[in-house]
Image (cartoon, helix red, strand yellow):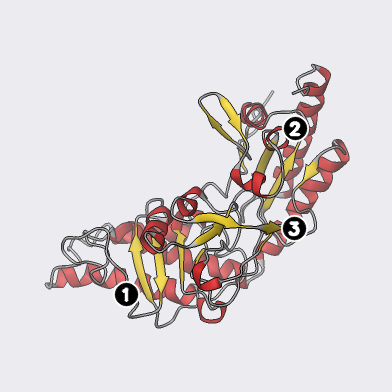
Amino acid sequence: MENMSRVYLDHNATTPLRAEARAAMIAAMDVVGNPSSVHAEGRAAKGLIETARALIADAVGASGADVLFVSGATEAAALSLAGRGLRCSGLEHAAVAAWCAADLSVVDGAVVVDDPTRSVVQLANSETGLVQALPSGLAVSDLTQGFGRVPFAFSWAGVQMVFLSAHKFGGPKGIGALIFPAGTDLAAQIKGGGQEMGRRSGTENVIAIAGFGAACAAAQDDLAQGRWDRVAQLRNILEKAIESGAPETIFFFFVQNRLPNTSCFIAPGWKGETQVMALDLAGFAISAGSACSSGKVKASPVLAALGYDDDAARCAIRVSLGIETTQDDVLRFAQTWTKSYARAVARGQTKG
């Protein structure tokens, strides 16, 4: 029997490198100068950084704002949140929750914000795909999952600071950006040579930054051209196929506003990590909706914030599609998943 090719359905974890980003990075490899040097070679490297900075500012609707390059969203979260005493909900990524008091309530999936200037709200959730309506004046928003998939512009959102990570939309890993109004007083955590406007020292990763800028422009074009509408249709096809084969499946926010590529659902009694392993062996890459620590499955803080207990949370998985995902991919997955679930039920593997 001919082996079927693997199907990657874990785009919320990381995305394949875009052709545009790859080309920009390869070109940048031939630029030898240090961007802090004043000679021609240094100026050429600096030029690549500033071109990327402009592309990112344009893509996120932040003309005139400062775009600060960092190693990724985790560093951006620390830089923007440390010592500020801000509040967040249990929906936030651990990189945000580490710096905030997670005491904002969640009602029907929506974060309740009473003081936007002291609050942090993500644009979209990585596990469920749930998209938030950001209140004007919000202190910080994590755009990591939402950028390039749902409309957003720094200029009209009214958020004080936002951050994003390149590898979530086809850029390289290990590079991200914090974006804020020009002239904002922001204390450096990494001190040294004074790069990045004195706010983040260390020689810039020119190659990754070049790829970041190219990926940003391409991601914004995907959104403008409506390519995610097709992905949303595929997600719906997948969910209907799953629901048809296993009516007892519980979907998160089947109707509410979600990312177009994200489906998170519970197969009652079938542990998430078991599903991930079974589907991996069958040729599909997906993620569990709950975390595993020291051999014990614990409820995801996100699912707990949404009111699901440990028994439900440990049976959740996330399937996240990409621009290149095909209808054949999702139908093959749905068929394989429903057959695997039926076998698990028949073998008594879904009894807790």
Can you tell which quarter of the image residue 271 is in? top right
Q: Residues within 10 Å of mark 2 (few under 14, many from 20)?
A: some
Identify residue type, mark 1: Asp
- State how far apart marks 3 and 1 are (Cα): 36 Å
**Residue beneath disc 2:** 336
Nearer mark to the viewer, of 2 and 3: 3
Residue 320 shows up from this direction:
no
Q: Does 103 sit left or right of 240 as displayed?
A: left
The circle drawn on residue 185 is 1
Label 1 SS: loop
The reply to whether callout 2 and callout 3 are in contact (CB within 8 Å) is no
Residue 108 bears which disc, if any?
A: 3
Disc number for residue 276:
none
Mark positioned earlier in the residue sequence (1 or 2): 1
Image location (x, y in percent) of residue 70: 34, 59
- Nearest the viewer among 351 and 234 is 351
